[in-house]
Image (cartoon, rainbow, N blue to C red):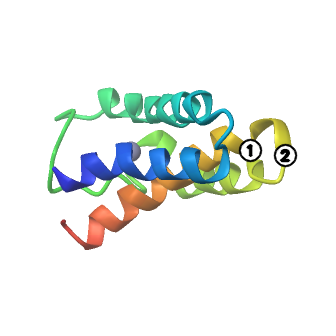
């Protein structure tokens, strides 16, 4: 439960901290990056609390994470890339630290 809460809280802190003038818009874009979890629909079962998403789901593969990190350098995609990188970090920590 804490893991899911962090998926909402960390983007909110980032939006308020780095995009204070347009934090609502930034927060909506960061939240939209949660759509990356649609790749869970390809798995059976769709949700497994004991499964590590990183390296399992197609959009959570190391190659894709590398693309998200590279996209941080391209300003028009930076906010989306930030949301995806934060998402991957939170999913990764969930593999090792069940909080
Ligand atoms: Zn995920």
Quadrant for ligand 1 reads: top left
In space, the residues marked 2 and 1 are separated at their CA atoms by: 6 Å
> Is disc 2 in contact with disc 1, using a CB cutoff of under 8 Å?
yes
Residue 8 placement, left or right of 68: left
- Looking at the image, which is closer to me, 23 or 80? 23
Q: Secondary structure at mark 1?
A: helix
Q: Is residue 81 above or below residue 45?
A: below
| Image mark for residue 74 | 2
Q: Position of residue 7 (x, y in %)?
A: 36, 46
- Looking at the image, which is closer to me, 69 or 14? 14
Q: How many numbered discs?
A: 2
Q: Position of residue 98 (x, y in %)?
A: 19, 67
At a point 25% along the width and 54% down the height, the residue shown is 3
Q: Is residue 84 above or below residue 92?
A: above
Q: Secondary structure at mark 2?
A: loop
- Looking at the image, which is closer to me, 91 or 12? 12
Crowding at mark 2 (Cα within 10 Å: few <14, some 14-19, many 20+) = few
Name the residue tied to disc 1: 78
At a point 66% along the width and 45% down the height, the residue shown is 81
Q: Position of residue 13 (x, y in %)?
A: 48, 52
| Image mark for residue 60 | none
The part of the image, by quadrant, that contains residue 55 is: bottom left
- Looking at the image, which is closer to me, 60 or 71? 71
At a point 26% along the width and 46% down the height, the residue shown is 4
Q: Position of residue 89 (x, y in %)?
A: 46, 61
């Amino acid at each position: 439960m804490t893991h899911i809460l962090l998926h909402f809280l960390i983007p909110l802190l980032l939006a308020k901290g780095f995009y204070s003038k347009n934090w609502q818009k930034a927060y909506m874009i960061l939240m939209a990056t949660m759509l990356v979890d649609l790749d869970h629909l390809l798995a059976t079962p769709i949700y497994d609390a004991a499964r590590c998403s990183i390296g399992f789901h197609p959009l959570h593969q190391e190659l894709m994470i590398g693309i998200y990190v590279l996209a941080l350098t391209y300003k028009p995609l930076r906010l989306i890339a930030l949301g995806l990188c934060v998402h991957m970090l939170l999913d990764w920590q969930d593999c090792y630290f069940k909080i």
